[in-house]
Image: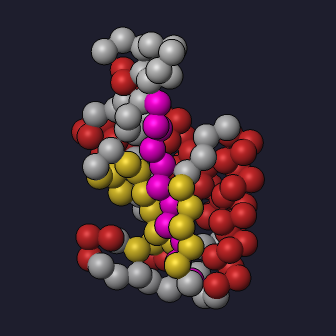
């Protein structure tokens, strides 16, 4: 299906699952057309502060992840709605979040592997 500006839907920007797996940054998981990451914190407030910083980053980029706060864990999920899946904008957003995490000194072990059902922190 070609891009139709009336529908604002452009499926040709959507990446294949293989491309997502190849390009996703460390700590991120791809599945069912989304790119997601869980980050654990020592306190609820640290998680909220992180979510606010991610929101400011997203505003600057003009591309916004879903952000869910679960006590001391923040889940981020990127998905480009008008493409119907993950696009390079999502990959770039995930990379920028990883830079934010590094700047905050959050260790990589604070990422939870959702396939193992555990959250570190």
Residue 22, horizontal then vertical, whole percent: 32, 42
Residue 9, horizontal then vertical, whole percent: 44, 23
Which of 9 and 108 lies nearest the eye of the viewer?
A: 9
Quadrant of the rendered image containing residue 10: top left
Q: Which residues are magenta?
A: 72-82
Which residue occupies the extreme front position in the image?
Answer: 6
Q: How many marks?
A: 0
Which of 107 and 59 lies nearest the eye of the viewer?
A: 59
Q: Is residue 76 left or right of residue 29?
A: right
Above-or-below relation of 37 to 81: below
Q: Is residue 40 left or right of residue 119?
A: right
Q: Which quadrant holds the N terminus?
A: top left
Q: Residue at x 60, y 46 (%)?
A: 64
Quadrant of the rendered image containing residue 41: bottom right
Q: Residue at x 34, y 71 (%)?
A: 113
Residue 50, horizontal then vertical, whole percent: 67, 68
Q: Residue at x 34, y 82 (%)?
A: 118
Q: Is residue 118 left or right of residue 89?
A: left
Colour treatment of the image: secondary structure
Above-or-below relation of 57 to 70: above
Q: Is residue 26 visible?
A: no
Q: Residue at x 70, y 50 (%)?
A: 57
Residue 40, horizontal then vertical, whole percent: 52, 78
Which of 65 and 116 lies nearest the eye of the viewer?
A: 65
Q: Is residue 117 visible?
A: yes
Above-or-below relation of 106 to 84: below
């Amino acid at each position: 299906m070609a891009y139709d500006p009336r529908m604002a839907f452009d499926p040709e920007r959507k990446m294949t699952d293989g491309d997502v797996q190849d390009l996703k940054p460390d700590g991120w998981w791809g599945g069912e057309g989304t790119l997601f990451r869980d980050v654990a914190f020592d306190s609820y407030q640290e998680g909220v502060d992180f979510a606010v910083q991610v929101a400011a980053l997203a505003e600057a980029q003009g591309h916004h992840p879903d952000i869910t706060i679960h006590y001391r864990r923040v889940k981020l999920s990127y998905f480009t709605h008008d493409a119907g899946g993950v696009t390079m904008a999502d990959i770039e957003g995930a990379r920028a979040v990883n830079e934010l995490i590094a700047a905050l000194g959050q260790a990589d072990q604070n990422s939870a592997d959702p396939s193992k059902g555990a959250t570190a922190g």
